[in-house]
Image: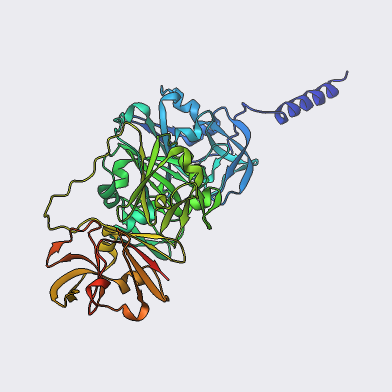
Amino acid sequence: MSNKKLVMLLVLVVVLMVGCATVGETVSDELAYEGGLKIVSNDIEKTVLYNDIYKMENTTVEMKNLSSSGETAEVEVTGASLLNIIEEMGIDINEVASLRFIAGDGYEIDVPKEIFDGKDIILAYKFDGENLFEPQMPLRTAINDVRSMYWVINLVEIDINLSSDIEVEDVVDGNQVYYILEEAVKSLETEDYSYYDATDSAIRVKDLFEKYVDNTSNSVKFIATDNFEKTEELDILMDGYIKITGENAPLFTSPDMPAGMQVKNIVSLKCGNTTFLTGKLLQDKFTQKKVRNKSGASLEEIVTFLDITSDKIEFFASDGYSAQVERNLMNEGILNLMDDTTYQIKFSEVLDKSTSIKEVLKFTTVNEDSEIVSPEVEENSDVDSIWEIEISGLSDGDFNLGSEKANRKLEKVKLEATKVKKDGTETTQEWTGYKVNDILSFLKVEDYNAITFISSDGYEVELIKGNIDDETIVAISVDGENLTYESQIQLVVKNQTGNMWVKSLKQMIIK
């Protein structure tokens, strides 16, 4: 073979060797960037020069990420392994509880262990064979099959949170409590909150927790739509807001919080033994079924999602009315949307109507050995008596009006009325209570012919619409003293004889 042919053969071999480089090759000097990536863990701080990362042993792999709208993007990623760098710092990756990726523009996001557990994290500088470009340089994180918000461009710092840094949670005793967020926030003060170009309503997390959470924990867990989960320190939450209207609501945020740390579309928020649930998102998440001509989210699916295994569940209305139902009967029930922000619990004909709860505020787990303590009411106290009346004949089913709801929703009136007895004698007294017309207005009853008022002993009186005016009331006290009848309320009809006044009122039937 001639020397000329031998030289040409050697050149060809060299070209082929260069062209066949695969996993494990280093990047040429064409990629360079000033400065370095800061990595912090407690008192350990290290800066790795970007140019050194470019020269590390790299890997090229196909990955995909998911947008917030659910769209999947597939891309070929080239870069160095973050896990290798962490191990070189003497940190056991199994002890890493979370990572915080920080971008040069201030964007931050926490990545909990469940997101990256069992996966590699690539400090990427090439995508589909092309180098990153400004403003994405110098690095972008890449984790396979996770939301795109974890693929942080312009990466400048990584903070490592170890399991040993997290305080051990105290075991929270007592039953679990679950609040419907939309109902719970009605008693809290709202604030205007600017979110991009919109002005929405928000509540302070501190106000929510102080009112409803008895046993707090060191951290709080979010579950958002598409099953996104995030754990956040309690102190961070207590300085923040929950935006309850507008885009992505409910949304956890604060004025100075980077967008990557916000939590959008919160399905549940748990602190200690208390969990807040968004009724609207529960409707979207779980199967819709029909019960007593009403549609709503399956209660069985909701309590399974919450991992409730107690013997019973007790449901509470906002007025304090409650009903206990066996856990194994949840497949008979739904969470039904009554209006934009009000929900009700409804069960099928297998259970009594009394188990249905309108304006549901919360529900709690109840075990057979649980001790249920009822509040004590002192005799002759100056507080309103506790009462409840069933109102039927409504277009959307029966409604139980109780003392607490009436006190919050209706205006009390005083009425001086004279009762004429059978013997012709008269008694004039000052009665306090609620106008029947106000009750009808609250229940959105716009047209009716008559109402039948029934006492606990079965005595009943029917009043036609023309005989019901603003001086017809459901009375709760007389001359400043609570009524002592069995039901503790009475129908008072001014300018009518005593036989039209119904003591121990228990039911109203609207016709």
Asked if residue 260 can be seen in this view, the reply is no
Residue furthest top as drawn: 1
User: Residue 173 appears in which quarter of the rendering?
Assistant: top left
Dividing the image into 4 quarters, which one contains the N terminus? Answer: top right
* Residue 78 rendering spot, x and y as whole percentages: 60, 36
Residue 134 location, x and y as percent? 53, 49
Which of 44/28 is in front? 44
The foreground one among 503 and 101 is 503
Residue 170 quadrant: top left
In the current view of this chain or complex, which residue is farthest to the right?
1
Q: Is 25 placed left or right of 10 in the picture?
A: left
Number of marks drawn: 0
Q: Camera-side residue: 511 or 194?
A: 511
| Applied colour scheme | rainbow
Depth check: give the residue in front, 382 or 84. 382
* Residue 458 image position (x, y, % from top left): 33, 60
Is residue 492 depicted above or below 200 in this figure? below
User: Residue at left 29%, top 51%?
Assistant: 208
Residue 326 lies, in percent from the top left, at 42, 39
Which quadrant is home to the C terminus? bottom left
